[in-house]
Amino acid sequence: MTHDKTTPSAPEMSWFAWGDPERAEALDPALRDLIVQALHADVSPIPPVEEADVDLPPSHLSDRLRELLAGIVGTDHVLTGDAVRLRRSGGKSTPDLLRRRSGQADPAPDAVVRPADHEQVQRLVELCSSEGVAVVPFGGGTSVVGGVDPLRGPFGTVVSLDLRRLDGLVSVDHTSSTAVLGAGLRAPRAEELLGEHGCTLGHLPQSFEYATIGGFAATRSAGQASAGYGRFEDMVVSLRMATPRGTLELGGAPASAAGPDLKRLVLGSEGTLGVITEVGVRVRPLPETVLDEAWSFPDFATGTEALRILAQSDVRPTMARILDESETFVGAALGGREATPGCQAVLGFEGTAEEVETRAGLVRRLMTGAGGTRLGPEPVAHWRENRFSSPYLRDTLLGAGVLAETLETATTWTGLLPLYEAMTEALRGSLEGEEGGAVILCHVSHTYPTGASLYFTVATAAGSDPLSRWDRAKRAVSDAIAEAGGTISHHHAVGTDHRPWMVSEIGPLGAEILRSVKSALDPEGVLNPGKLVPERS
Amino acid sequence: MTHDKTTPSAPEMSWFAWGDPERAEALDPALRDLIVQALHADVSPIPPVEEADVDLPPSHLSDRLRELLAGIVGTDHVLTGDAVRLRRSGGKSTPDLLRRRSGQADPAPDAVVRPADHEQVQRLVELCSSEGVAVVPFGGGTSVVGGVDPLRGPFGTVVSLDLRRLDGLVSVDHTSSTAVLGAGLRAPRAEELLGEHGCTLGHLPQSFEYATIGGFAATRSAGQASAGYGRFEDMVVSLRMATPRGTLELGGAPASAAGPDLKRLVLGSEGTLGVITEVGVRVRPLPETVLDEAWSFPDFATGTEALRILAQSDVRPTMARILDESETFVGAALGGREATPGCQAVLGFEGTAEEVETRAGLVRRLMTGAGGTRLGPEPVAHWRENRFSSPYLRDTLLGAGVLAETLETATTWTGLLPLYEAMTEALRGSLEGEEGGAVILCHVSHTYPTGASLYFTVATAAGSDPLSRWDRAKRAVSDAIAEAGGTISHHHAVGTDHRPWMVSEIGPLGAEILRSVKSALDPEGVLNPGKLVPERS
């Protein structure tokens, strides 16, 4: 096996786990005992096979194709080594990691291709379209919905189009508060480059350490401070995308009535319509002050109601979350704190010192009026320190035989608690049985005037057939979401995993629209086959 | 000629002018003298011909089609009388009104059809698609870009699909702050119905008195308080649209990552993809307090910079406008006030009393720091009283031989003043000559973190051939907008008038996307032919 260079801004991710292999940890025996007790089940470790023992399909790249690809990106950037192909064989959902731990890495791409710039991407997608080669765009590889699975569809060859070299800060316009960023820029590096100009995107999803700007755009990402900074799609002011039919350049004006906003078709297109190469975004000044506050509420319903009041007021925190009773309890336990009774909310304020103080003052009145008790900043500090580490804990648990996965949706405020109940019931019903039960945690982390998201974390014993076990739960909860009128994804996107629910999300005619746009831009269907766009039934 | 019933919420508009015929006024002789002096040209009245003398093409509706249409909506709602067809023969741009004043009403629809509900609209578009009948959706008829011109394209028959009967408040969800509104609801009636529930949309464009909810959605409308309430498209949470291929129902969740946001394809589709029948919107509580403040700035550049600072801060007014030197001067003259030197800005704050006071305090500090002088509320009161009357003044001027028209765009803050200069120059260059000059006024009325709109009002002597005269100016200024990177429309939409600039706006591939979606939803091309979607070149 050959190892390729890792990215400039972060170590290459583990092939069977999230993130930096150096940061992997074993499960604390006391925590293990607690979990076993909570799950009413014994658990057995699930160690990964040796990398050399992974069942990786050989590359089918023909010499002719290799030469054509190398003609565009250069020989050094057409990679067919096993190590690099293994690391582009899929994303980071729990099923993905379970499969790889057990030595399954099929499908794998026939090659990983690393273009240097938009022009090379444009030539690559045209070549792949005319040669019938499936193209799977690859940014940070953080998908948890199968979005980067190297599916080849009806084609003989599939390449993973790694965008890491498109990692420049193309331009900054201080007056207009905008910047143009390369699609392959990882979020921490983007923040570093913008920080040199005194700016920030303020976009910090849990995938922050690895995710890329192009991935944020392609999947309609939402960051933890979405209450203040908005969803990623709302920051986007312009886009550049390479398609087999040519380059699409959109946007620039802050608002327009010149027909439908076609940027919104690119945002969320998940590599099925083209490869996003540059993203123009609104930026903001680095905040002068960050003020955190934890609050306590007697129960989830009261706390959720408080967040609704905030979201519908004109003065809001930059970040607002409320944990349900279970997540409040577990969060305190993991943080080594005594759990306060009821539910904990976490608020953050960013801005100038004066403006933060004013907003915080108004918000405190609303929170107190809604039944909240102020706890101070300490619990938030623990959350901030660990905000990107949950995926590592998931691997720790998985290694110990505990399947931990997340699920998310959004709905109206009116529908929120009924959906919470329906999802909890679907999860419990599908996971409880001979192989033990499930620990189900939930929080609301994204609020809007008309509704909010629900983010579930589920832990259960992996059992004898963890993939089937999770598949059963995932199907039950997805059906429950669709039935209750929630969206099938608030920020994880569609990929392969949510595709079966797309017709219930947008209707058969909505699916027809997606297919018609795909036919117009990708007539041969080489772009990310098998993802997002429902097949004609 | 037969007269049909007028709408429930407002009198039928004049066939040759904006709005309520009862509100038409003659030009004040003193104002006429001032204008003649400013334009360096004499002007001659342009009286409308008698309605009986209008050259209205006869209806080509066949008996068979009449029967088929009546089978869906009932005989009473298939109208072919001259008066009703004349009043559906186009919109309200200055060229529209000039044509009608001179007795030209060709094209006119062969029939005006008034469905009662979504099901009837759905059956109508299916019928028209299978029978090859062009369908022009008609809401308030306020288009100033040719959006409701009854073009028949390649079809033998064209019907105007009048949505006035879809005028219900379908539902209100107080918890989620949403309401579902019929597409044919006029804005004042929508506010009345929402007001009974203590709610408002806060959407007040200049067309407010006649425009409909469906029209707002179909054209990506922006209201005068967009700084606080947002653009109409940002309020939309769900949509129902009838297409020849079936009904499209979208949205509900406050946010989603389930593929591209297809609502954004419907918003701005201008009746070319389907007929919007219901719109789910975010609503807000009726404001407790409205606080207005006028400000003065030494010049347009300083005032614009102040608005930029506000738009990029986290605490904003609900409404923010800045008039250039000319518009400040003319505004004061029309209001019978002495003009303050420099430029006037207008701010409005809405919300709870406490929150308004807090925001206004922070904003005052920013405005003062940016070189503004506070003038108090009086000039804003005059603006509020007359905010919907400018179109009446336009008709008064037109009747007297003065062509007055508006133009609008948006661009980044960096590009704003250069675009302002380029547009002014294009207007001046194309209008100054033997037939006199032009009075050119401009304001910024919609601000965003990354840029703002420019709204021009141009007055010039109608001259010997006013249609050609204006066409020349419109083409020159539209080319200047495209060249400078502005959008061809910030809120007037595309219709027929801006269609030639759509390819420069979205590129040939963007145009291909629009055509592909249109083919999917309207395979026969019966929906609003000749509007928005560029033809294959």
Image (cartoon, coloured by chain):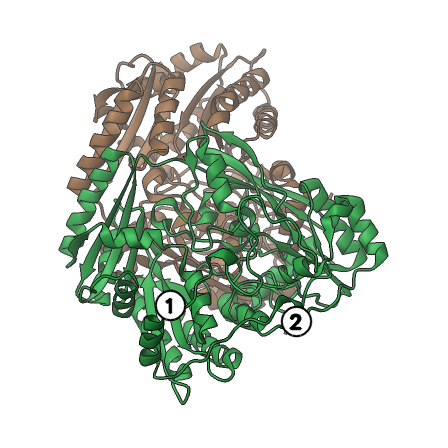
Chain colours: A green, B brown
Q: CA distance from mark 2 to mark 1?
A: 34 Å
> What amino acid type should be assigned to the residue bearing mark 2?
Asp
Furthest residue toward right:
A64
| Mark before the other along the chain sequence, 2 or 1 | 2
- The residue lying toward the viewer, choosing from B536 and B231, is B231
| Marks 2, 1: nearer the viewer | 2
- Using the image, name the chain to which the residue with label 1 belongs: A
Tag 2 and tag 1 share a subunit:
yes
Residue position for label 2? A53
- Using the image, name the chain to which the residue with label 2 belongs: A
Residue position for label 1? A456
Q: Residue at x 35, y 16 (%)?
A: B329
Residue B395 visible to an observer of this rendering: yes
The x, y position of residue A147, in whole percent, is 58, 62
Q: Is residue B165 left or right of residue A137?
A: left
Disc 2 packing (10 Å; few <14; some 14–19; many ≥20): few
- The residue lying toward the viewer, choosing from A284 and A141, is A141
From what the image shows, is residue A175 above or below residue A192? above
Q: Which quadrant: the C terminus of chain B?
A: top right
- The residue lying toward the viewer, choosing from B422 and B528, is B422
Q: Quadrant for residue B35, please give it.
A: top left
Q: Residue at x 58, y 62 (%)?
A: A15
The x, y position of residue B342, in whole percent, is 34, 14
> What amino acid type should be assigned to the residue bearing mark 1?
Phe
Q: Quadrant for residue B294, please give it.
A: top left
Residue A256 visible to an observer of this rendering: no
The x, y position of residue B344, in whole percent, is 32, 21
Secondary structure type for disc 1: strand
From what the image shows, is residue A316 above or below residue A423? above
